[in-house]
Amino acid sequence: MIETSDADDRAARKARRLALMQARIDLPVPVRAAADAALAGHLTALLGHLAPASLGFCWPYRAEFDMRDVVAAWLHADTTRWAALPVVGVTGVPMRWRRWDPRAELPLDRYGIPFPGDGPDLHPELLLIPCNGFDARGYRIGYGAGHFDRTLAAMQPRPLAIGVAYELARLPDTQPQAHDLPMDWLITEGGAWPRQSS
């Protein structure tokens, strides 16, 4: 039997992550447009079903689904609602959430991603979390830094976690590690569903 080292495992996970990201980036424009329209409809319906009063979401990064229009329409429909974007600190520290104003100019963080530069820390009741890969049990492949796992573990009460991805990110098994936390729901252009029990 051939044994693999931790370094081999890390290299394999990184290669899989990069391949999934590249497949998303390479989606043909018409395919992406159709997927985005379907995803927007499913996300709107799911938010209506779950009926949160607040949510956190992520600015689109590396060709992820752009949730801003759906979230802006959700906010417009009820002025008591609020949405937040993450503030990513140093590696190893949970993210914080600050209120998003669709009209506001935002500074860029060290990754070049816009974020609210000031305001109080908030606790959204639902988080929309992008996935590079996912499986039916709700486990996701992110960017390898563990930001969302660490953040979900630290937030009490834990927000409802919704994994957002394209169907091309679906995997039979993400091979989660001990620290990985599953999403509660998953949503793609194919629909929305609660995770399967392990």
Image: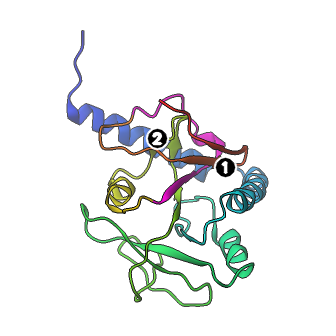
Q: Residue at x 57, y 42 (%)?
A: 169
Question: Which color mode does the image show?
Answer: rainbow
Q: Residue at x 56, y 53 (%)?
A: 162
Q: Residue at x 58, y 58 (%)?
A: 64
In the rendering, at what x and y percent does residue 77 appear?
A: 75, 78
In the rendering, at what x and y percent does residue 145 appear?
A: 32, 54
Amino acid type for the residue under numbered disc 2: Tyr
Q: Is residue 37 magenta?
A: no
> Please, what secondary structure does the residue beneath circle 2 have?
loop
In the rendering, at what x and y percent does residue 62 appear?
A: 53, 60
Amino acid type for the residue under numbered disc 1: Leu
Most foreground residue, 124 or 72: 124
Q: Are marks 1 and 2 in contact (CB under 8 Å)?
A: no
Q: Is residue 167 magenta?
A: yes
> In the image, which disc is placed on residue 139?
2
- Give the vertical position of 138 relative to 78 (above or below): above
Report whether 125 appears left or right of 168.
left
In this rendering, the label closer to the viewer, 1 or 2:
2
Q: Residue at x 70, y 56 (%)?
A: 46
- Give the vertical position of 97 relative to 139 (above or below): below
Question: Over which residues does the magenta segment extend?
Answer: 159-175
Mark 1 or mark 2, earlier in chain: 1
Badge 2: how crowded within 10 Å, few (<14), some, or many (20+)?
A: many
Q: Which residue is mark 1?
A: 27
- Give the vertical position of 175 relative to 66 (above or below): above
State how far apart marks 1 and 2 are (Cα): 23 Å
Most foreground residue, 63 or 154: 154
